[in-house]
Image: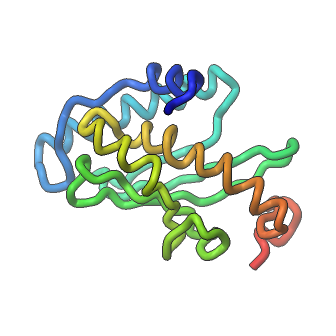
Amino acid sequence: MVDEVTKKTLAQIPLLKTKAGPRDGEQCIQRLKEEYQSLIQYVKNNKDADNDWFRLESNKEGTRWFGKCWYIYELIKYEFEVDFDMPITYPTTAPEIALPELDGKTAKMYRGGKICLTDHFKPLWARNVPKFGIAHAMALGLGPWLAVEIPDLIARGVVIPKDAGAGDKS
């Protein structure tokens, strides 16, 4: 079940209409416009709620996304590179979000630093094709993953703040 805060967050993220992926020509351009509109609104909502936690941009075609995400824990900021490629079957298939610098540091991650979203997020995505987009993947995928995994990685000494000098421990 989805809690009330998550429901409220989702209600404020615009849903997408165009079911088009990287192979779909002009429709893909329309989908990319919808993706950006949804992301812009989600980032604005986060800023308004003093919950700004990521930046994303894409290549011109919208097939490769990259940026940074961060997690504040005990008033210390932990920042990570984030990237993903749009699957050729997008939006039927959700993107696999990666935090490459955390590769191999937690069991809830696949090779290449791809975060594990199989049990909870992917079924939800499948029920909401084509309405969900990248903003939804961030809100329902990466956000909750960071909230669970980063405090554990910090407690185990696997991750330290970047301004502590050495980045994260190997």
Q: Quadrant of residue 131?
A: top left
- Total number of numbered discs in the rendering: 0
User: Which colour style is shown?
Assistant: rainbow
Point 46% across, 48% down: residue: 120
* Residue drawn at 82 percent across, 67 percent down: 156
- Look at the picture and state if 34 lies above or below 49: below
- Residue ID at (39%, 30%): 38
Q: Is residue 100 left or right of residue 123?
A: right
Is residue 64 positioned above or below 166 on the image? above
User: Where does the C terminus fall, quadrant-wise?
Assistant: bottom right
| Residue 137, image quadrant | top left
Say which residue appears at 61% left-offset and 76% top-offset.
104
Q: Residue 82 in the image: x percent, y percent?
A: 54, 57
151 sits left or right of 3 in the view? right
Taking the view exactly as shown, the residue that stands out farthest to the bottom is 170
Q: Residue furthest front?
A: 1
User: Residue 62, relative to residue 2: is it above or below?
Assistant: below
> Residue 7 appears at what percent x and percent y?
50, 24
- Picture layout, residue 75 above or below residue 43: below
Q: Nearer the viewer, residue 67 or 145?
A: 145
Residue 166 location in percent, x, y? 82, 72
Q: In x, y percent, where is residue 63?
A: 30, 56
Q: Nearer the viewer, residue 61 or 148?
A: 148
